[in-house]
Image (cartoon, rainbow, N blue to C red):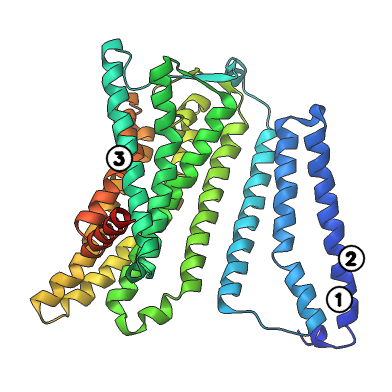
């Protein structure tokens, strides 16, 4: 707009936005401090309000400070990565504002007579995989072994990639982040289960349950997003090999990882907003060894329609869209590989994708299946079995899939072993 380009108007705009920004930040901070410090305001309504105030601070901080600096320095430029980052943050905080306002409207709705009959609780009982006392030592040994193997395997991959300069490429940068996410993923659930078996305790507090669910969703969604990013990386490497290092530059790689983290936090916040609204549940028993989101939702929602809407919404946003990105990437990859004349060239191109495809099939086959089938026919036994698969088995086998089928990783591990023995 030409009126905004008027140099006489710039000082007025600068002063106006400079005054508006601190007022908005200070106002929202005062609301957060008031809600946090006053025990009378520790209710769902003010919990949502404090979160809305925090999101509003972030929302306005995404655009206004940049505008103020731009007016002051008379600069209108923003880098490509900076523009994408600003757009992503604007969408994330704008979407959070939208969802929080929806939650606040729902909070104001009167409770039905059925919901009033539910029980107020402060803790849950994790029923685990089996109540058979003779089976507990076997489960203890099995899951302790799986956890140690997963921890050691993923740490070795991270160390091998960090220590070997030949592996300082986008593909292995994403793989090291995937290994880190896998460590966080399995550490969220399995150690708690091992301790419960050892101490013969099945109790987890309400806050502990929400914390475990949040971390589980954060690391699980990071796995989800990183697998999509790795598919895009393979697409660029095979379909645009000459431009690979230009496209997959370090800034873009870091940006994609940070975007994965932000989307993971957003998904976790979405589930928390649903769960924290309810302190009344149909039951205190969770038929699993951790606070599995779909089972917690089953205890919260007596209304099947609401439960199905939430389940399918999360499945579409965090299952269908990333999986669509993977399918599109591999459609382009296969089309490009089929145009390679030599069979050895085709085999070499396919071999770089085999490990990734194996992990994708394992992860998505169980993670999406558990969300979609739980809303159709709820079966605690099936959900528990699938939970073991994607929360313990997959983080354990991922290092083997990537190391046994990857000569670069095997060579890096051998060099790491030699350096360790020599030192």
**Closer to the camera in the image, 155 or 299:** 155
Give how far across and how far down residue 185 sits, in percent: 42, 42
3 w.r.t. 194: above or below:
below
Q: Which residue is mark 3?
A: 149
- What residue sits 26% from the left and 45% below the top? 397
Mark 1 lies on a secondary structure that is helix
Q: Quadrant of the C terminus?
A: bottom left
Crowd tier of the residue under label 3, counting other residues whose Cα lies within 10 Å: few below 14, some 14–19, many 20 or above: some
The reply to whether discs 1 and 3 touch (Cβ–Cβ < 8 Å) is no
Label 3's element? helix
Q: Residue at x 46, y 40 (%)?
A: 216
Report the Cα–Cα distance between label 1 and label 3.
59 Å
Q: Nearer the viewer, residue 159 or 192?
A: 159
Indicate which disc, 3 or 2, sits on the residue closer to the N terminus.
2
Specify which label sits upstream in the sequence, 2 or 1.
Answer: 1
Position of residue 52 measured from the top left corner of the image (x, y, whole percent): 71, 47
Q: How far apart are the alpha carbons under marks 2 and 1?
A: 10 Å
Left/right of residue 111 with respect to residue 320 in the rendered view: right
Which residue position holds label 1? 13
The residue located at (61%, 24%) in the rendering is 279
The label shown at residue 396 is: none
Seen as rendered, the residue at the extreme left is 343
**Discs 3/2, front:** 3
**Crowd band around label 1 with a 10 angstrom C-alpha radius: few (<14), some (14–19), many (20+):** some
Q: Tell me if I can see residue 66 in this picture.
A: yes
Vertical placement of residue 207 versus 157, above or below: above
x then y, percent, for residue 57: 74, 55
């Amino acid at each position: 707009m030409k009126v905004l380009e008027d140099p006489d108007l710039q000082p007025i705009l600068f002063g106006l936005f400079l005054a508006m920004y601190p007022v908005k930040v200070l106002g929202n901070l005062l609301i957060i401090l008031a809600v946090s410090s006053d025990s009378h305001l520790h209710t769902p309504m003010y919990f949502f309000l404090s979160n809305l105030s925090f999101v509003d601070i972030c929302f306005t901080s995404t655009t206004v400070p940049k505008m103020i600096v731009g007016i002051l320095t008379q600069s209108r430029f923003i880098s490509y990565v900076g523009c994408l980052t600003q757009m992503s943050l604007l969408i994330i905080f704008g979407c959070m504002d939208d969802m929080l306002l929806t939650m606040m409207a729902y909070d104001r709705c009167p409770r039905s007579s059925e919901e009033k009959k539910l029980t107020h609780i402060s803790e849950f009982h994790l029923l685990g995989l089996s109540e058979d006392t003779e089976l507990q030592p076997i489960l203890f040994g099995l899951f302790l072994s799986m956890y140690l193997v997963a921890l050691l395997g993923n740490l070795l991959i991270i160390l091998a990639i960090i220590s070997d300069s030949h592996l300082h490429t986008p593909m292995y940068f994403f793989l090291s982040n995937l290994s880190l996410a896998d460590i966080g993923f399995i550490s969220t659930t399995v150690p708690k289960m091992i301790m419960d078996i050892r101490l013969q305790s099945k109790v987890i507090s309400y806050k502990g349950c929400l914390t475990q669910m949040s971390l589980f969703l954060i690391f699980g969604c990071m796995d989800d997003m990183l697998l999509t990013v790795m598919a895009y990386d393979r697409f660029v490497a095979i379909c645009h090999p000459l431009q690979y290092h230009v496209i997959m530059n370090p800034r873009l790689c870091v940006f994609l990882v940070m975007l994965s983290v932000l989307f993971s936090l957003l998904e976790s916040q979405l589930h928390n907003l649903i769960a924290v609204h309810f302190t009344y549940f149909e039951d205190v028993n969770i038929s699993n060894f951790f606070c599995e989101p779909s089972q917690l939702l089953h205890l919260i929602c007596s209304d099947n329609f609401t439960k199905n809407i939430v389940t399918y919404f999360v499945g579409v946003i965090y299952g269908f869209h990333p999986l669509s990105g993977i399918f599109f990437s591999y459609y382009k990859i296969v089309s490009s590989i089929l145009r390679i004349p030599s069979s050895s060239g085709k085999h070499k191109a396919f071999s770089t994708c085999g490990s990734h495809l194996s992990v994708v099939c394992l992860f998505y086959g169980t993670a999406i299946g558990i969300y979609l089938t739980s809303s159709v026919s709820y079966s605690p036994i099936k959900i528990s079995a699938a939970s073991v698969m994607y929360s313990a088995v997959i983080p354990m086998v991922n290092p083997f899939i990537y190391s046994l089928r990857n000569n670069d990783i095997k060579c890096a591990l051998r060099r790491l072993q030699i350096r360790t023995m020599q030192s």
